[in-house]
Image: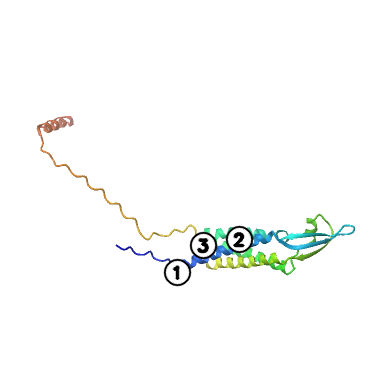
Amino acid sequence: MSHPAPSAPAPATARGRRELTVAVLLCALSGGLALSASGEPWADVTVVREPPLPPTAEVLTGGQAAPLVAACGLLLLAAALAVIAVRGAGRVVVGLLVAASGGVLGWSGLRAVTGSLDLGDAVVTSGIGLGEAQVTVDPVATWPAVALVAGVLGVLAGALVVLRGGEWPGMGRRYERTGQPAAPEPAPARPTRPARPETDEDRHQAAWKALDRGDDPTV
């Protein structure tokens, strides 16, 4: 006896799963790139101090030049799990946060690449224990560019979640079973013993039982 083949998932459901996978990968990739870029050099800083103090050179990492980069990276990594765990309005909120984090990353990376990142003399000089100095900043474009790419990926992931996330499955979704378990078979009936003819001893015991109940056994 041949069994019917299981029905294939609906095209909309399969497409939703693919889009969910893409969004999760984009969030994770964007967050990983942001965290990597935050620990790498973003700018070479030369501080010219008043004589007789010699000039000093410092290297600013992404976390020092743009502190929000590392925070956005952590948020994007957390969002990669949150997109799977939540549904409905919660997923839309996660998508908006992802898009906002991507925008912050992209803006920080773009400003560093173009040399317009405002480090502030007071911030740099206070970091090396100086009060007044001339600061020259030479940006390193490689890692800010990585942050810029991470920001673009984050914005794309956030837009995908907001626009399409309502049709995706969630972690807590349960799917109906296609078949029902077979009902248990009834237990076989126990064979009945054939009735035997009543004896004098049976009638004697029945009379005593009737007397115990208060009945007249002669009726």
Task: Give the left or right position of residue 186, taking residue 26 as reference.
Answer: left
Q: Residues within 10 Å of mark 1 (few under 14, many from 20)?
A: few
Foreground residue among 163 and 62: 62
Q: Residues within 10 Å of mark 3 (few under 14, many from 20)?
A: few
* Label tally: 3
| Mark 3, secondary structure of its residue | loop
Which label number is shown at residue 76?
Answer: 2
Q: Residue beneath label 3, please? A: 88
- First in sequence, mark 3 or 1: give its number: 1
Q: Nearer the viewer, mark 2 or mark 3?
A: 2
Q: Residue beneath label 1, please? A: 11
Amino acid type shown at disc 2:
Leu
Q: Residue at x 77, y 63 (%)?
A: 44
Quarter of the image with the C terminus is top left
Which label number is shown at residue 47?
Answer: none
| Mark 2, secondary structure of its residue | helix
